[in-house]
Image: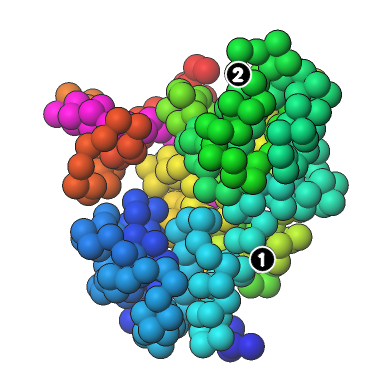
Amino acid sequence: MFELTPLTPGSTIGIIGGGQLARMLCLAAARLGFKTIVLEPQQNCPAAQVTNCHIDARYDDQAALQQLADRADVVTYEFENLPVATVDFIGLSTRVSPCSKALAVAQDRVEEKAFLNQSGLKTTAWCAIENEETLVAAIKKFKRGILKTRRFGYDGKGQIRLEDSGRITASEALAQIGHSPAIFEAMVDYTKEISAVAARDYDGHIQIFDIAENIHHQGILHQSKVPANISPKTVELAHNSITNVLHGLNYVGVLCVEFFVLADDTVLVNEIAPRVHNSGHWTEAACLISQFEQHIRAVAGWPLGLPLRHSDCIMENLIGEEVLQLAKIAEEPQSLINIYGKDEIRDGRKMGHVTRLMPRNKLKI
């Protein structure tokens, strides 16, 4: 519908959402000579501090969305809990990447699991939960699992672990999530969690960053270690899976796929994220091209960069008051600090991250 010529320096990239991911996308865009315009209803959001223009408006404000579409040469977004109608509306006036199909699939866990299984990718066993009766049946069938809201859950929010002999009843669990539409995912025994971050351009070319091994605390990503301690078989399966997802969604931009690694080195897809991702933050310190620059290159119609990694590394999130340790962290050699500019420190809130570099093949996991 819109001409797919590469953007020239001085062009404007619109970003819906103004959090830390948008902030880092703005900085990457500026390095390449692009201007940015961010639409975000929070006045002093992290991205507002570094963008050329901030539209302070709701995501469903059509007048503001039209302003964004009129002023941007291409529009992208930083998170998946965005109304599909918002992306479709902007798409009437200018190019939007990734497309709304990726958004619709990723923001609903049932749609996501169905898409993955239909694409031939294995996931943990699951079933949609409509009411207490279906949840009771699921617990009886799978014995143990996790009840999750179909939409809006992240960093462990909207999730309850359940067992057939557990103390929480189906009725109590549904009450805890406000009787929201839900999914029940069977628990699986796995050896580790990994994630693949990759980019696809308009012509279907794909570049994949090295696989990260992830450690979570209370549902929030704590560390990403690269390289992951996994077999070549696991690497190949992860690469094949993310390639399948990117092509299946006709995706443009950076996308992340999270996996469970099983004892036999096979993988199950946990979830997909149609955006730059927390487990890819290490790329800004340890790679020639970061995930943020790669996303800007993709949506701008530029050639993708080679995701060459020059160092092993560990990326660690700074959660809540951990950010107050900055003076001590700053003393560490070979460490890159990134603070997000958020006004208020809160428990469980990502305030920044630090990536610690080391020579390749020196990282012990």
Queried whether the magenta region covers residue 275, the answer comes back as: no
Q: Is residue 309 left or right of residue 264?
A: left
Residue 75 showing in the rendered view? yes
Q: Nearer the viewer, residue 168 or 224?
A: 168
Q: Nearer the viewer, residue 125 or 291?
A: 125
Residue at 49 percent across and 36 percent down: it is: 157
Point out the tag, 1 or 2, that comes first from the N-terminus.
1
Q: Is residue 355 above or below residue 151?
A: above
**Residue 129: horizontal and vertical position, in percent?**
72, 40
- Report the residue marked by disc 1: 101
Residue 24 showing in the rendered view? no
User: Which amino acid, mark 2?
Assistant: Ile
Spatial separation of the CA atoms under disc 1 and disc 2: 36 Å
Q: Is residue 230 left or right of residue 20?
A: right
Where the N terminus falls, by quadrant? bottom right
* The magenta segment: 307-327
Q: Residues within 10 Å of mark 2 (few under 14, many from 20)?
A: some
**Residue 327: horizontal and vertical position, in percent?**
14, 29
User: Which amino acid, mark 1?
Assistant: Lys
**Residue 93: horizontal and vertical position, in percent?**
51, 87
Residue at 76 percent across and 27 percent down: it is: 136
- Report the residue marked by disc 2: 168
Q: Is residue 65 above or below residue 282?
A: below
Residue at 66 percent across and 66 percent down: it is: 101
Queried whether the magenta region covers residue 317, the answer comes back as: yes
Eye-nearest disc, 1 or 2: 2
Q: Nearer the viewer, residue 175 or 31?
A: 175
Q: Is residue 167 above or below residue 156?
A: above
Q: Residues within 10 Å of mark 1 (few under 14, many from 20)?
A: some
SS of the residue at dot 2? loop
Residue at 34 percent across and 65 percent down: it is: 40
